[in-house]
Image (tube, rainbow, N blue to C red):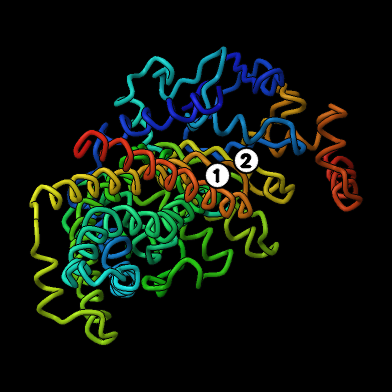
Amino acid sequence: MIEVKDLHKSFGDSHILKGISTTFDKGQTNLIIGQSGSGKTVFLKCLLGLFDYEEGAIAYDGKIFSQLSEDQKRNLRSQIGMVFQGSALFDSMTIAENVMFPLQMFTKMSKSEMQDRTDFVLKRVNLADAHNKMPSEASGGMQKRVAIARAIVNNPKYLFCDEPNSGLDPKTAIVIDNLIQEITKEYQITTVINSHDMNSVMEIGEKIVFLKNGFKEWEGSKDTIFKTDNVAVTDFVYSSNLFKKVRRMYLEENQ
Amino acid sequence: MAYLHHIGTYFLMIAEMFRKPTKWKVMKHLIFKDINDLIISSLGIIAFISFFVGGVITIQTALNISNPLIPKYLVGFATRQSVVLEFAPTFTSIIMAGKVGSFITSSIGTMRVTEQIDALEVMGINSINYLVFPKVIALLFYPFAIAIGMFLGILGGMAACVYGGYATVSDYILGIQTDFDTFHVSYSFIKTFIFAFVLATIPSYHGYYMKGGALEVGKASTTSFVWTSVAIILLNYISTDIMLG
């Protein structure tokens, strides 16, 4: 579980995060949504420890990140899996080497054990035959799946995903969303996803935090987001005619 | 103030490089890879340039000795001194600032742009140690490349001397043996070690701390070449003044 209390972050005179408090529970997919410039990426980078913040606290299972020593922070980070927006695979390594990398760095496994674990995880993301390909030879969807495999190979306690289905076709995007949700349930990970994609919100948003201008405007789930009368949320989530219709139908059916 | 900020950040990066070392099993692989990328792959260009510049030094020296009282072996002497004292350690290092330095800046800069460095940091890896330290260790082998450059520079001088008819082989060999001071070779290698450290760290600094996209990677490579060259020239002056002055 990750608890965030009254988080403030500024860059010079620009106050980006303005007192965000929320909780991300274990074993569920938590989504952070909001318009471009609302502070989602800054929030995610604060959660990851890549940005320092001026006020507030972030606690990972009760341990407040800012109070940890450098070594404790590094140890905590070794329990974090991250899927970057652009996948961030290491160009000079094959797909199998990319996935094996966290095992080489943080475990004392033998080569054959690492190989077995890599095979297992690549099979889990449906990439059993891609071991020797270079990242540049893989499609966008494959790269995202490799990034997920790399993120989960060392059994992380926390999984962060920054726009995991950006640039993917709708079908592949749903495959990626479902894969993240399955893995979250299967390994009881605390998963936080930064997303623009309304399909993801409706599909896997077990908890949704909506940011606007650096404030937490609303929080709920994929079920409550249909019923909310928060104008900022409805304007953002139901901006397309299709989603407006879906919402109207949902509300009519559930009246 | 901006310069002071850069200098301070550079030294902090060097201090960070020695903290929280990467596992030796992984580091060993990275060092061998960097020896191949930075040293072995540069041998061809070092050999080519050294051989022909050695030849040019010989021709220039021979053509400028018009007085018949000046012995012919002086051509070999001048070539040896030029190649050993300055050409091999200093000017080869400036050429390497272009080749190796640009490679280091662009490869680390691309990792920054594509969030690969963030990926290392998120995993809890000391990314400066992981990326920069193996390059510093790999460049400890740089003096071997310079030694090859010295040998080929003097050999190129001999080839030019013989085929151009400027002096006989025995005159040339007498010249390269005349007044030979072993300290000059030590001086040259001490300088080379200093330049090797500069060649590994300044381009790494420019790549690691770059901001922006692909265009900025190109700009960072150019800036890195300029500052590496400036540092080499300044350190060359300071080390020469201390050791030979």
How many other residues sit within 10 Å of disc 1, few (<14), some (14-19) or many (≥20)? many
Residue A188 in sight here = no
Q: Chain of mark 2?
A: A
- Residue depicted at 50% across the width and 47% down the height: B226
Type of amino acid under label 2: Asn
Asked if residue A77 shows in the view, the reply is yes
Tell whether A172 sits left or right of B90: right
- From the top left corner, tell me how far across and down residue A136 is, in percent: 50, 68
Side of A248 where B176 appears, left or right = left
| Residue type for callout 1 | Cys
Q: Residue B225, how many percent across, how many down?
A: 47, 50
- Give the percent coordinates (x, y) of residue A104: 25, 51
Chain containing mark 1: A
The earlier-in-sequence mark between 1 and 2 is: 1
**Left or right placement of residue B79 versus residue B216 in this view:** left
> Where is mark 2, residue-wise?
A194
Residue displayed at 13% across by 75% down: B171
Is A99 placed left or right of A12 in the picture? left
* Residue of label 1: A161
Circle 2 Cα neighbour tier, 10 Å, few/some/many (<14 / 14–19 / ≥20): many
Q: Does A71 sit above or below residue B91? A: above
- Is B120 placed above or below B103 here? above
Residue placed at 48% from the left, 30% from the top?
B6
Q: Secondary structure at mark 2?
A: strand
Q: CA distance from mark 1 to mark 2?
A: 6 Å
Q: Nearer the viewer, residue B159 or B89?
A: B159
- Kindly indicate whether the residue at mark 2 contacts the one at mark 1 (C-beta within 8 angstroms): yes
Q: Are callouts 1 and 2 both on one chain? A: yes
Q: Residue at x 40, y 42 (%)?
A: B202
Pick the front one: B117 or B6: B6
- Compared to residue B159, the image places residue B2 above or below, namely above
